[in-house]
Amino acid sequence: MSQPAKPAPPAGRANAKKELSEHFKQYKHVWVFVEQERGHVHPVSWELMGSGRRLADKLGVELAAVVIGPAGEATKAAAAEAFCYGADLAYIVADDVLTDYRNESYTKALTDLVNTYKPEILLLGATTLGRDLAGAVATTLLTGLTADCTELEVDADNSLAATRPTFGGSLLCTIYTLNFRPQMATVRPRVMEMPERVEKPVGRIIEFPLGMVEDDIVTKILAFVPDRDKATSNLAYADIVVAGGMGLNSMENFQLVRQLAGVLGAEYGCSRPLVQKGWVSADRQIGQTGKTIRPKLYIAAGISGAIQHRVGVDGADLIVAINTDKNAPIFDFAHLALVTDAIRLLPALTEAFRKRLSPHTRDRIAS
């Protein structure tokens, strides 16, 4: 008589086993890709330097900045600035071929660096550029990539524990890259706190050749069209944000949010359903699939506060939530909860602030 088959062990981290090959055991240190375009470093790079410094200290390894760009002072300046945000050393790949971002050239530069110097952890900003580059690099290196992380930690066995929302933002999951290196993750702007800048001299710099010429690259840059005059929001870096959700009931009522924001000198935003309904443009969406913000004051009117929205606002210093439902999830993490109808309260708040705030006071309200 045959014996019944033993049930398979449940899948998951608890039953996974890290078995690094001898090759991958050589991978050490934490790297942060410093994203720069036309002489300007994206702030998310310095935010990641703060997280990278914390991870490197826990692992007892070095923190390195990776700067890729055209030959010249701008690229050197970005590398020098990295030391002021905690870098122990900087890798520079400088070549005029890298003047403008192209996936092929940047992917070669970064993958060649990784294969030569073997970092254990590689962090990039989840910007348009960073997402494109991170996916290509991870695919080329045949390693794992956790995108849009909200938290980065080092586990008991020194593995990178990268946490991100999943199932449409309804749950948070922690992802591990157990048997491959480097462990890669992207983090959106304003998710991590900006570290304090400390003036420091330029440290150790390692220059690395690109090993590619213009004729090797299929994609060509025909022209550069700046979008600085485009009327888009500045939600990620606003000190005050007022946002509305489905509790406002109509597109017309969303004007109440814009009016309060105007009086406060604030940016305005919304939750995902309002974008899906076409009431507000996508650049105003706050949450995991929209913008992550860290304002000093956040006023949420008629927003229920699902996890995908929460991860977009958790860094706010003060969250004021207005909702008729006393059991709304947003009240679980708001600092001040107002159980009332936002449609009635917003005009009253707007008028009260209009009477009390001079233009000079409005400019300083978030200071």
Image (spheres, rainbow, N blue to C red):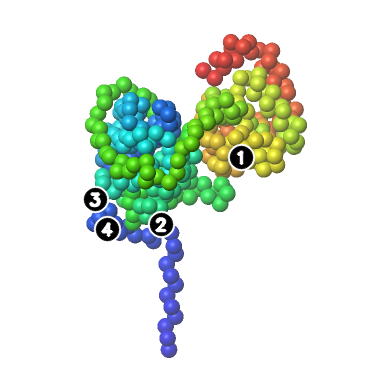
Q: Secondary structure at mark 1?
A: loop
Cβ atoms under marks 2 and 4 closer than 8 Å: no
Number of residues whose C-alpha sits closer than 10 Å to that of mark 4, classed few (under 14), some (14–19) or many (20 or more): few
Left or right? Give the position of 231 relative to 347: left
Q: CA distance from mark 3 to mark 1?
A: 44 Å
Q: Read off the residue under disc 3.
A: 26
Total marks in image: 4
Amino acid marked by disc 3: Gln
N-terminal label among 2 and 1: 2
Number of residues whose C-alpha sits closer than 10 Å to that of mark 3, classed few (under 14), some (14–19) or many (20 or more): few
Q: Read off the residue under disc 2.
A: 13
Q: Secondary structure at mark 3?
A: helix
What residue lies at 60% left-to-right and 15% top-to-bottom?
Answer: 362
N-terminal label among 3 and 4: 4
Q: Secondary structure at mark 2?
A: helix
Q: Read off the residue under disc 1.
A: 305
- Locate residue 104, reporting x and y percent: 40, 45
Q: Name the mark nearer the viewer: 3 or 1.
A: 3
Amino acid marked by disc 1: Gly
Q: Name the mark nearer the viewer: 2 or 4.
A: 4
Tag shown at residue 21: 4
